[in-house]
Image (cartoon, grey):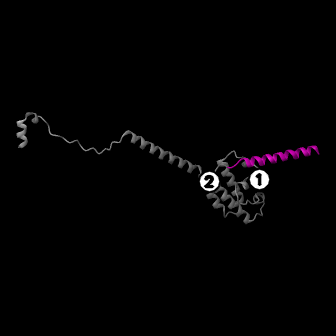
Amino acid sequence: MATTNIANANPALASLADIIEPDFTSQFALAPIYWLLIAAIVAVIGYAGWKITQRHRYWFAKRQAIKLLAQLEQHPAAAKQINQLLKRVLQHYQPAHPALSASSEQWQQWLAKQSTLTLPNLSQLLYQADSSAAEVEQFYIFARQWLTDYKANADTEQVNSATTTNTLQAIQQDKEQQHA
């Protein structure tokens, strides 16, 4: 009643409408800079995930070779298969590597320089039937270490220098035979 009396006393107050509160909004409005920051963070996380996936796929052949090597441990003709496995891995990651087309001696020299472990004589191990189980085991251990340490950037200079040296020696021998 007091309100009605005040409205009757003052006609300007009677024309005013009641105050209406706005509806509660549940949306949280962010400033545009925060949206840009969120987009940048999502982009960085997406790029990192993509690179991790790409790296995982890149090293799949190496992981598969290590699994195959573990299966070859008990195989009787393991030496030839281990040698083929090492060459397959090298060919997968470096298809134009000169060690792939090198002779057995050059392949063995190149492999021996890749690790600190002792490499058995591959000529005897691969091409003779009387290879010992100890030599095969030694080659298996060498191959496992080589595969574990391999970073897909094997040195090509060692093979090239060995190939060049052998080529020069062959040329000198040919000249000596022609003069004789």
Task: Residue 98 in the image: state x and y as whole percent.
Answer: 73, 46
Judge by depth and name the residue closer to the eye, 78 or 91. 91
Please state, as top left, top right, bottom left or bottom right, where the N terminus lies in the image.
top left
Q: Residue 62 carries which label?
A: 2
Judge by depth and name the residue closer to the eye, 147 or 33. 33
Range of residues picked out in magenta: 154-180
Would you say residue 163 sits in the magenta stretch? yes
Query: Which quadrant of the view contains residue 42?
Result: top left
Residue at 7% across, 35% down: 10
The amino acid sitting under disc 2 is Lys
Q: At numbered mark 2, what does the secondary structure look like: helix, strand or loop?
A: helix
Left or right, 140 with reference to 2: right
Q: At numbered mark 1, what does the secondary structure look like: helix, strand or loop?
A: helix
Task: Residue 170 in the image: state x and y as whole percent.
Answer: 84, 46
Residue at 75% across, 65% down: 132
Q: Which tag, 2 or 1, sits closer to the chain's start? A: 2
Tell me the residue that label 1 is attached to.
104
